[in-house]
Image: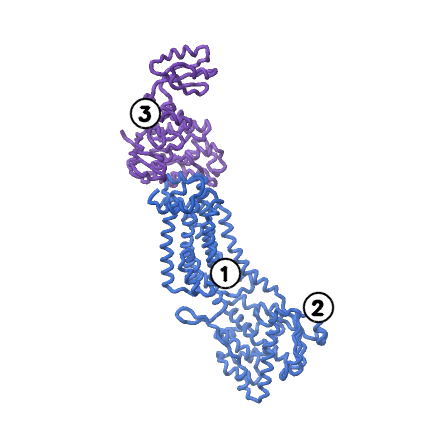
Amino acid sequence: MKRVFLVARREYFEHLRTKTFWIGIFSFPVILALSILVPSWLEGKVSVRKYAVLDHSGWLLRAVEERASVPDLAKVFLSLKEAFRRGGKALEVFPPFLRVPALGKVLEKMDEGTLEKFGEALSLVGKPEGAALLARAGLPPGAADLVKKLRGEIGKWWRSLPPEEAKKIAPGSGKSRYQRVPLEELGNPGEEGLRKLVDQEKLFAAIVIGPDPVNTSKGCKYYSKNLTDLDLKRWFEGFAGDAVREKRVRALKLSPEKVSWLMAPLRMETLKVTKGGGEEKASLSARLHQFAPVAFVYILWISVFMIAQMLLTSTIEEKSNRVIEVLLSSVSPVQLMAGKIVGPAMTGLTMILAWAAFALVGLQVLPLLVEHVPDLGLGAILSDPAYLVSFLVYFLLGYLFYASLLVGIGSVCNSLKEAQNLMQPVMLVLIVPLLSMLPVVKDPNGTLAKVLSFIPPFTPFVMMNRVAGPPAPWEYVATTVLLLVTLVFTVWAAAKVFRVGILMTGKPPKLMEILRWIRADRS
Amino acid sequence: MDSVLELEKVTKRFGEVTAVDRLSFHVPRGSVYGFLGPNGSGKTTTLRMVMSIFYPDEGRLRVLGRERAMEVKDRIGYLPEERGLYKKMKTSDLLAYFGRLKGMDARRAKTRAGELLEEFGLGEWADKPCEALSKGMGQKVQLLAVLIHEPELMILDEPFSGLDPVNMEVMRDAILRMKREGRTVLFSTHVMAQAEEICDYILLIHKGRKVLNGTLSEVKSSGPRGIRLDYDGDGRILHELPGVERINDAGKTAEIFLRDGMDPQEILAALVGKLVIRRFDLREPSLHEIFVRAVGGTEERGVA
């Protein structure tokens, strides 16, 4: 056992001296940081869509803007709630009148749906439906008073806020994506003039509202050069349609309560069913949880492959250096093989632990560097034993499986070039878990996922892939037992091949010959 | 007599080929034991079996009193024919590593590595990677790597092959020193002349079988005495001499074996005036001659 450790220790320090190791260690945090920073930087670059509206009806534009502010305000309050929770610098982007602790306390009690109603109530204050809504919305105590107090100020503040600021406070809000340019600023052009401005790309789109939108869609137009990105059209149409429908309903002379009841949209709460049939809010972080396995499988695959490759190289090097036989006078072939397998495993673990440390530190440091990093619950994923523990376990099992294959291959080859030929079938097998990565993560308990988890070479990757499922306990047990049984066999076979192959020079043997060695009792 | 190594009818086959065929011999403690034979005669296979890198198919093998060399590996040093170094490792680290693999503790291995390097004139290379060493220095380090743990039994497979005269000397001194320290050295070679210089005991094998075995003098006296001739001139005349059974003519020296009843004086008389004779004596045959006679004279070319 001591000899195994000595061999492993030498391998470990030898790997530590290689460039591959350090590139491996540092490429990960660089990629991780880039993958977080680049999208948020790119997002900042996406230009705000400018548009103008020529309103012949005289009222619809105002109604649309009023309605559009409802979901926007809900988003503002959502990030305000988050800012209160985090406290400190996060609050500074908000104006002083929103930074009152009383508001924080009320927001704390509201979920996403209630926040939307809160926003809606704010925009409807003073209207008859507003009071009815306030009464029905189930807002926490104190919310109604706040609505009255904030009403005037928040609307003014939000309208005057530049889009870049709006994006920081409430990313994805209508205001941060679309900016209406008042007609006065454009010199009050007619429909013809607007079309020219669109043509000159001064405007992304121009919208014309007909004189009587309640009765007919005639004269309502959307001009743009880009007809593939119709988000703006849909966004505007949605609110305009609601406003028009409200007018039509009111024409029926119904009571305000009935109107608001009629107009109340049906909203489905999005819930994710968790283990045991419980439910949980589907948030961004929950969705991330669902897709996190892909990243883990990818890292798992890369580390298993990279480390096993190191093992292959060092075996061939030792063989071509002719150190092997001196070693064999001190350690048995099995000890040597064990040491050679354990050494890279320690290298791999070092690398993985370094990555985990980078990720944890990064999660603490990143928010200080970038102003708006949405809390994606990465910390929760990293500390979830289902992820980290299965990652470590499957790394070790997967590595052991492929290491025993590669150490066998390495022992019969005299050069990397020869090894490449024998590696081809192994590579073909290794590709499968990469190809199945997305299908499996989309349907972690589907037939494909289940079948693949029972094929030992794929088990570590596919089970890691399914972790968000999660698979049933019996599946964990059954696949692991199957994998362990296979492992015992491959390691045993590798030891047989290793002890014959390691002293062989000349042409690498044929597969049949290798199989004969495995069957032979002794050599 | 106390034996450090005993082989009884050891046989090893690789597929159809019998590499070692019922080989038996004993290596007495404290001796320098030469294991001789042409290339491909089974020397390396035998030594690998002794090191339990291979296992014999038949027969019995005892090393330092044990069935399995595995149990006593730490008391044996083994320098294989194919040897190398880890290129990237520091010379002293490499020696210490091999020492520790033989069970030395870390500190002892480290100091011993430094001492050995100093002793063999490689002190200033201790902190350099092995790839920086010249070929000759590398060969020294290879030897040091297998004797750092001061083994009782040293097994050297073709220790002299590829050495320059200086390192040849270093190797010979190392072997003799180990003998003086009471250690046993078993080494294989296909160069008979090297064995003649330093061996106490000789084992000759051919095609996996023992041909001759005994102390150097026993082996030598088993063959007929012959004339050792050192000369200058055209050696073709030697082949025309009467009454000669065999001649090993090397151009400047020759070994001449006469038929029974022939008088060496007649040969001398026949040569005077035709060659410049620098030496003419009657003595025991060379190992080369003994070997050639033992295997029937048909395999001469394999023997240097």
Label of residue A200 in the image: 2
> Which chain hosts label 1?
A
Task: Supply the letter of whichever chain is blue.
Answer: A
Do discs 2 and 1 belong to a common subunit?
A: yes
Q: Residues within 10 Å of mark 2 (few under 14, many from 20)?
A: few
**Mark 2 or mark 1: whose residue is earlier in sequence:** 2
Q: How many marks are shown on the rendered structure?
A: 3
- Which tag is nearer the camera, tag 3 or tag 1? 3
What residue is shown with label 1? A363
Note whether B65 is above or below A221 in the view shown: above
- Same-subunit check for callouts 3 and 1: no
- Which chain contains the residue that carries disc 2? A
Q: Secondary structure at mark 2?
A: loop
Chain letter, purple in picture: B
- The answer to whether residue A109 is above or below residue A262 is above
Q: Which residue is identified by label 3?
A: B215
- Provide the chain ID for the residue under circle 3: B
Cβ–Cβ under 8 Å for marks 3 and 2: no
Q: Of helix, strand and loop, which one carries label 1?
A: helix
Residue A214: % across, % down: 62, 83
